[in-house]
Amino acid sequence: MVPNNFTRSCCGLRMTEVRLFSTCLAEQFFPAVPHAAAAVLEGLRVRVRPVRRAFCCGQAPFNEGLRDEALALARRFLKSCEPGVPIVIPSGSCTSMIRNFYPHLLAGHPKLAARAEAIRPWVHEFSQFLVKVLGVKYVGAHYERGVAYHASCHLLRELGVIDEPRILLSAVNGIRIFELRDAAECCGFGGLFSVKFPHISTAMLSDKLARIHQSGAETLVSNDCGCLMQIGGGLHREGSGIETRHLAEILASR
């Protein structure tokens, strides 16, 4: 869906406004990510207003069966946003929670469910928003390193975002793209999965790290901070020099 307040001219997009939802993982552990996402959007003449009164979509308690806690976080998010203004999220995981799982969480709360349904078409993952809504492929980024892209499970399987990150990366000046073997395999994070099933999670991470090393890449890029935390932690423990970066950070590079 392309919101009707996005109008195009021969010179590109006219100034419009979005709300940027940073997510709790980004705010706590990857604060450079929302700053980079905002910089990219502002560079495209989009006015960015942060979602300030909500910090978490509620996915972690929802997945653990803590419905009351998840409901409180969902209510807070929904009160912080309004239909008619695009909500951009640098996370496939959180985007999927809001778009795909709020209907289940809010099934017994008609007013909240109606508000979630009204907001749902305006919720976009970052790369999806750039390519599908703004119609942008090139943002003027410059990054002279070899990069491999890891697609997070929620982004790939729950949102169907496949090509958008690759389109954006391929247009970055100076970049060299390296392909991962078994690229669609999970890194093993899965939120609480990595806590509840650490041995399985560690085995999945080991496979992913091996693929990253085999690729020859100098930087591993993903769209989800959970994946960056899992993979970055594994690389650090190995003493590897391979960096991890969110897609927004690459696109904000000059």
Image: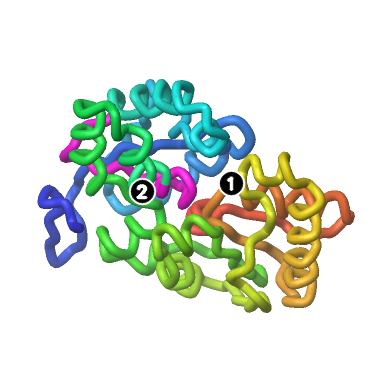
Neighbour tally class for label 1: few under 14, some 14-19, many 20 plus, Cα within 10 Å:
many
Neighbour tally class for label 2: few under 14, some 14-19, many 20 plus, Cα within 10 Å:
some
For the image shown, how many numbered marks are present on the structure? Answer: 2
For disc 1, the marked residue is 225
**Does the magenta run of residues contain 216?**
no
For disc 2, the marked residue is 100
Seen in the image, is 102 located left or right of residue 236?
left
From what the image shows, is residue 66 above or below residue 86?
Answer: above
From what the image shows, is residue 216 above or below residue 28?
Answer: below
Seen in the image, is 172 located left or right of residue 89?
right
Relative image position of residue 1 (x, y in whole percent): 20, 58
Q: Amino acid at mark 2?
A: Asn
* Marks 2 and 1, the one that precedes in the sequence: 2
Instruction: Calculate the distance from the C-alpha at mark 2 to the C-alpha at mark 1.
Output: 19 Å
Q: Secondary structure at mark 1?
A: helix
Q: Which residues are magenta?
A: 81-96
Q: Secondary structure at mark 2?
A: helix
Q: Residue at x 12, y 48 (%)?
A: 5
Seen in the image, is 213 located left or right of residue 105?
right
**Does the magenta run of residues contain 85?**
yes
From what the image shows, is residue 7 above or below residue 137?
Answer: above
Instruction: Quadrant for residue 193, please give it.
Output: top right
